[in-house]
Image (spheres, rainbow, N blue to C red):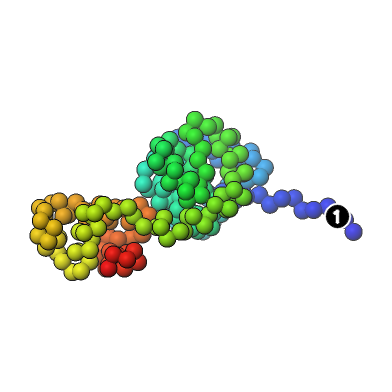
Amino acid sequence: MSTTGAPPQRRRVSVVAPPTTAASLRAAIAAEPRLELVAAAERFVDLVRAKEFPGDVVLLVEPAGAPLLAHARTAITAGAAVVVHSDADRALRESLETTGAIIVTEGASPAEVARSCAGVDRAARRRRPRAIDAADRRPRLSHSERRALAHYVQGHSTVQVAAEMGVGYETAKTFLRRVRAKYAALDRPAGKRAELISRAEEDGIL
């Protein structure tokens, strides 16, 4: 009986990248024998719609910012390891690393990025539980944002929230807009009052 083992299975990679770098990354992934490209898109929202998403590894080549962090969390929660190729500042890098994402500096070559995708799986999966920790899913609201949210989800209009807080209408509106943006950055929709009520209940604000 032959004892020859089967060749190792290639890791399936999904990529979000702009047109300026997509072609070189696809070529580098194709040249890496441990990888198989299964999906690619310019926008994360389009990648998520692909039936092959998330695969084993999701490579995010996106501008630094809150959406990038939200996309990394979404991909990790979906079951993939995540490699981020971006010029993230220190605060964003720490947040990304806390979720379990691996950061590749913006100056890395496509071949280096591909090698990172090939070697990331085991380390990233060991760290993945942090990505779904309840504390990581709560936005950091200021005292005023929390007060505005608490009044609003109790049925107050924005005008009433402003009156309760002793601030102007535009200020109260800004507080609520920031609350929605911070929830959206964590991939927790809060565009409607009913959604905000659900988030406030989940996070112990109600």
Q: Residue at x 32, y 52 (%)?
A: 140
Q: Position of residue 156 (x, y in %)?
A: 15, 66
* Image-quadrant location for residue 163: bottom left
Q: Nearer the viewer, residue 185 or 48?
A: 185
* The C terminus sits in image quarter: bottom left
Position of residue 4 in the picture relative to residue 51 (left or right): right
Q: Amino acid at mark 1?
A: Thr
Position of residue 120 in the picture relative to residue 100 (left or right): right
Position of residue 180 in the picture relative to residue 114 (left or right): left
Q: Residue at x 51, y 49 (%)?
A: 100
- Other-residue count near label 1 (Cα within 10 Å), few / some / many at <14 / 14–19 / ≥20: few
Q: Is residue 15 visible?
A: no
Residue topped by disc 1: 3
Q: How many marks?
A: 1
Q: Position of residue 169 (x, y in %)?
A: 11, 54
Q: Position of residue 20 (x, y in %)?
A: 45, 35
Q: Nearer the viewer, residue 138 or 37?
A: 138
Q: Is residue 108 visible?
A: yes
